[in-house]
Amino acid sequence: MYFDFYDLIGKYSTSFTLVQEEKGQYDEKGDYVKGETVKTELTGAVMNIRDSKLYRSEGTLTSADKELYCFDKIENIVNAYVIWKDNKYKVETTEENAEFTGVYRYTLKYVSAFNGEAVT
């Protein structure tokens, strides 16, 4: 590891819920059975995306999107969501610099606000 971001990430860390939806399947009768939903409480730094990155992204990122820096690797981001401050974000991409920094970075695409309602 070349850089130590432990103190920096620790300073800005907050808790969030990682929701991963497993792929569904069809049973013997041919009926679709929805995959299991697994919720995990994690901590990490959820940050606003830099303005320079928003403008260069050609409209794929918005000011509502975030970046997540954490020490935990999210194994399957295909059906992964983050719930943070009553907002839902789709885990879109990852930066694989952990071998140098010890930190995983993910782009979180804003999905919706729940306004305090329970997330299912």
Image: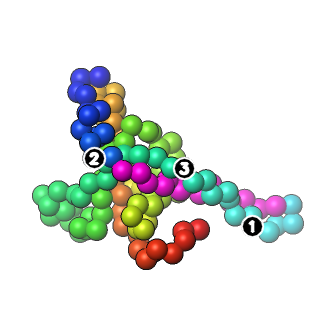
Secondary structure type for disc 3: strand
Residue 115 to residue 120: above or below: below
Q: Is residue 16 left or right of residue 47?
A: right
In the rendered image, which residue does mark 3 sit on? 40
> Which of the marked residues, 2 or 1, is nearer the chain's N terminus?
2
Q: In the rendered structure, are the residues bearing label 2 and label 1 in contact, judged by CB atoms less than 8 Å apart?
A: no
User: Where does residue 90 sit, x and y in percent of width and height?
Assistant: 43, 61
- 116 vs 14, left or right, is right
Assign the N terminus to one quadrant of the image: top left
Quarter occupied by residue 82: bottom left
The mark lying in front, picked from 3 and 1, is 3
Q: Position of residue 23 (x, y in %)?
A: 64, 56
Q: Name the residue at 28% across, 68% down.
A: 64
Q: Residue at x 55, y 71 (%)?
A: 118
In this picture, which residue range is highlighted in magenta? 14-27
Question: In the rendered image, which quarter is residue 56 located in?
Answer: bottom left
Give the residue at mark 1: 32
The residue pinned by badge 2 equals 12
Amino acid beneath label 1: Tyr
Question: Whole-Å distance between the Cαs marked 2 and 1?
Answer: 42 Å
Type of the residue with mark 2: Tyr
Asked if residue 8 is among those painted magenta in the image, a careful observer would answer no
The first of marks 3 and 1 along the sequence is: 1
Q: Say whether marks 3 and 2 touch (CB < 8 Å).
A: no
